[in-house]
Amino acid sequence: MQGFQKDGIVRRLSQLDDDLLSLYGPHVRFELVIVGGSALMMRELALQERFTTDIDVLKASSEIEGLLERYDMNTNVSTFLYKFPENWEQRRVQVPFEGQVLDVYTLSHEDLAITKLLAGRAADKADLDAMRASGKLDMDRLQSILDDAAEVRINLEEEEWALLMDNLFLLREGGLL
């Protein structure tokens, strides 16, 4: 599969929106929560040259889950939902996407950063550096979420917590790469 950028994400969301309108009509709304690189691109937090090969879906209206694969969307990330901050839903942010029947959300900047801090792959580190450089990542709010033991730490193994804290330290010191 070839990678795509923000315009490819918007095109796939628009196609899904059109199909949902055809299937269910204009009076039913559907919700989709995306994470990962596609969420960063939609929120303009990623590097300009950032590509993705799929759209990671954390949560979707149950009626549409069977359609997602057609649009290069996957729900594999939901397997790791237990590691996400507990109150992410209260902090989620609607994406500027003008769907006819589809509302698209992402995690907050800080919750997205936590997922990237946990993953710790080279692409995640580059994403974190780009988020920090954008000036849109509130480091104090991020720290506040991490300081609340019931938000993240309760769901992590000691090694995962240590990795997250090491990556956070590097991010605060000027970058992970």
Image (tube, grey):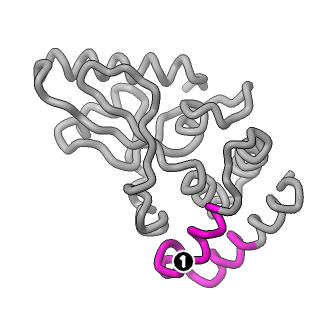
| Above or below: residue 38 compared with residue 12 | below
- Quadrant assignment, res 28: top left
Q: Nearer the viewer, residue 124 or 94?
A: 94
Residue 22, given in percent of the width and then of the height, sits at 16, 15
Give the overall secondary structure of the magenta segment: helix
| Above or below: residue 13 compared with residue 144 | above
Q: Is residue 146 magenta?
A: yes
Residue located at (41% from left, 21% from top): 12
Residue 115, given in percent of the width and then of the height, sits at 58, 57
Residue located at (72% from left, 73% from top): 165
Which portion, as a residue range, is magenta? 141-165
Q: Nearer the viewer, residue 160 or 31?
A: 31
Q: Residue flagged by tag 1: what amino acid is it?
A: Asp
Q: Which residue position is annotated with label 1?
A: 148
Residue located at (67% from left, 53% from top): 138
Residue 43, given in percent of the width and then of the height, sits at 57, 34
Number of marks: 1
Residue located at (88% from left, 55% from top): 174
- Quadrant assignment, res 95: top left
Q: Is residue 159 magenta?
A: yes
